[in-house]
Image: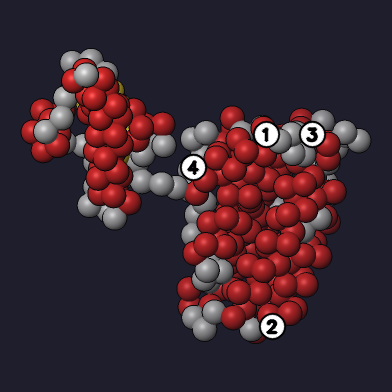
């Protein structure tokens, strides 16, 4: 009877220990890259068995909040949640449902329009957001004859706009969808560059000009104009090479260790 009761209690104790350690990570008491207390300290603090502590660490490792090193130099390192983790989790769900790349692109069009509208509403946009967007535009213009760096910088513009919309929930969700889409865009850019079919220089100049206009609308506080421009400028069709490209399925694996977007 006693052993059965212990077997029932052990998972619950592991979950409770994981809950307490998770709370320390999420509140910032344990920072990104910090080491968790040693196993001996955790055993003393929680008053549980070694298997229970190991199970608690396994729970946190599965959630991506710690990485556990085994062996003589072992220990657990803290990883604060990042947008990349969210993108990977969403990617797994979409992959399991056989969702297409085009479905992601169409969702992102609408999310970006909302983000652009909120950017235009920020009272501090001229100080904290617009200079960052203009910096991207100038860098993209300097890279106009270097397609892959140009593509990266244009993507950073969108990431900064999403990250700067002022609504943490929307920027997190939209940022995760953006990460999914950019995994496709990176592949597209490499493919067309290798094929010698990267869009023309004028196309690239027009892209930067569109970002200039969107930045101007945000700076002017034109909420409707910024939303309309963002949705009209973002056309998933321009990032397809073959007829089947829109129907390609989402693959989550490239997002496994994705860094958070720049802000």
Disc with the residue nearer the chain's start (3 vs 2):
2
Q: Percent x, y for residue 32?
A: 31, 45
Asked whether the residues under the numbered discs 4 and 3 touch, taking CB atoms below 8 Å apart as contact, a structural biologist would say no
Indicate which label's residue lies in the foreground, 1 or 3.
Answer: 1
Q: What residue is shown at x 57% (from left), y 62% (from top)?
A: 170
Q: Which residue is labeled 2 in the image?
A: 222
Asked whether the residues under the numbered discs 1 and 3 touch, taking CB atoms below 8 Å apart as contact, a structural biologist would say no
- Residue 85 is labelled as 4
- Residue 95 is labelled as 1
Judge by depth and name the residue closer to the eye, 185 or 69: 69
Q: What residue is shown at x 29% (from left), y 34% (from top)?
A: 12
Task: Kindly report the distance in space between the C-alpha atoms of the residues bearing marks 3 and 2.
Answer: 36 Å
In the rendered image, the residue lying farthest to the top is 71
Q: Horizontally, is 243 left or right of 201 in the view?
A: right
Position of residue 53 relative to residue 172, above or below, is: above
Task: Kindly report the distance in space between the C-alpha atoms of the residues bearing marks 1 and 4.
Answer: 15 Å
Secondary structure at badge 2 equals loop
Secondary structure at badge 4 equals helix
Q: Percent x, y for residue 43?
A: 12, 30
Judge by depth and name the residue closer to the eye, 2 or 122: 2
Task: Kindly report the distance in space between the C-alpha atoms of the residues bearing marks 1 and 2.
Answer: 37 Å
Indicate which label's residue lies in the foreground, 1 or 4.
Answer: 1
Disc with the residue nearer the chain's start (4 vs 3):
4
Whether residue 88 is visible, yes or no, is: yes
Disc with the residue nearer the chain's start (1 vs 2):
1
């Amino acid at each position: 009877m006693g052993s059965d009761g212990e077997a029932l209690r052990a998972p619950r104790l592991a979950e409770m220990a994981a809950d307490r350690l998770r709370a320390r990570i999420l509140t910032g008491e344990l920072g990104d890259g910090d080491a968790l207390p040693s196993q001996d300290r955790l055993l003393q603090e929680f008053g549980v068995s070694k298997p229970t502590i190991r199970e608690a660490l396994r729970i946190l490792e599965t959630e991506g909040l710690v990485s556990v090193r085994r062996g003589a130099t072992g220990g657990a390192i803290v990883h604060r949640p990042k947008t990349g983790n969210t993108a990977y989790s969403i990617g797994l769900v979409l992959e399991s449902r056989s969702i297409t790349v085009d479905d992601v692109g169409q969702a992102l069009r609408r999310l970006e329009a909302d983000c652009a509208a909120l950017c235009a509403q920020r009272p501090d946009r001229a100080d904290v957001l617009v200079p960052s967007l203009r910096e991207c535009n100038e860098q993209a213009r300097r890279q106009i004859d270097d397609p892959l760096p140009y593509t990266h910088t244009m993507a950073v513009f969108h990431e900064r706009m999403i990250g700067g919309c002022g609504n943490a929930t929307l920027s997190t969700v939209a940022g995760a969808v953006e990460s999914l889409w950019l995994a496709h865009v990176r592949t597209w850019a490499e493919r067309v560059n290798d094929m010698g079919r990267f869009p023309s220089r004028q196309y690239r100049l027009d892209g930067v000009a569109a970002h200039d206009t969107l930045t101007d609308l945000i700076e002017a506080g034109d909420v409707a104009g910024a939303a309309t421009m963002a949705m009209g400028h973002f056309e998933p069709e321009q990032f397809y090479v073959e007829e089947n490209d829109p129907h390609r399925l989402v693959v989550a694996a490239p997002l496994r260790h994705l860094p958070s977007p720049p802000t």
